[in-house]
Image: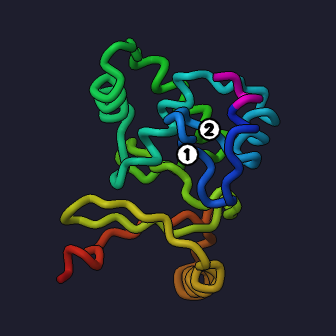
Amino acid sequence: MSSSKAKQKLKTNHIASASKDVDGDIVLSDSMSLKFKEAGLRMTQSRLKILEVLQESQKALSPSELFNELNSKYKKENFDRVTVYRILEKFEQIEVVHPVGDGKYIYCAHQACDHDKHFIAICDRCHKVQEVGGEAKALKILSHFLEEEAGFKMTSDSIVIRGVCATCSR
């Protein structure tokens, strides 16, 4: 499917940037298509499928885990590791994915967010990853506290927090 066809097939809100149409084809929202266009990237089938696997995953995936998921889901296609690594690198540059440490990535669920100011919560039991929005005030308080108490100036407000999710704490 061409990227222009993808843009026309389905319009989504700013949170869901890639989804499927009635035929099961992966389509992009206007905001996601614009990100790719501004970066000079074509929307290839490989990129679409990587977006889909990342978006469907409840866990952060390493390039190797993503590679295995892709080859499991799309058995007839050959994805190579180098391509997966390169695509993830580009996706990080255009802020489609967030690195969460340990060489793993999650799909950015809030495409309208400030990518330098967010919390990512990771459950230690089930490994579910959730991007948490609306945290600007909390980050400002934390930044001020660190600067006042430790003389530490934050250069990025992207914070990964580990704990136990609501489902696992029951």
> For residue 27, which numbered disc appears in the image?
2
Q: Assess whether residue 3 is covered by the magenta stretch.
A: yes
Q: Magenta span covers which residues?
A: 1-5
Q: Which amino acid does label 1 sit on?
A: Ser
Q: Which amino acid does label 2 sit on?
A: Val
Check the image and report above or below for 3 versus 151. above
Q: Which residue is drawn at 33% across and 69% down?
A: 162
Please state the horizontal and vertical placement of residue 92, each as a whole percent of the image: 59, 41
* Scheme by which the image is coloured: rainbow
Q: Which residue lies furthest to the right in this view?
A: 38
Query: Is residue 134 highlighted in magenta?
Result: no
Residue holding disc 1: 19
> Which residue is the extreme one toward the front?
22
Q: Where is residue 147 in the image (x, y as percent from the top left)?
A: 61, 80
Cα distance between the residues tagged 1 and 2: 5 Å
Position of the C terminus by quadrant = bottom left
Relative to 124, is 164 above or below? Answer: below
Q: Nearer the viewer, residue 164 or 167?
A: 167
- Give the crowd class for mark 2: few <14, some 14-19, many >=20 residues within 10 Å: many
| Residue at horizontal 32 percent and vertical 29 percent from the top | 73
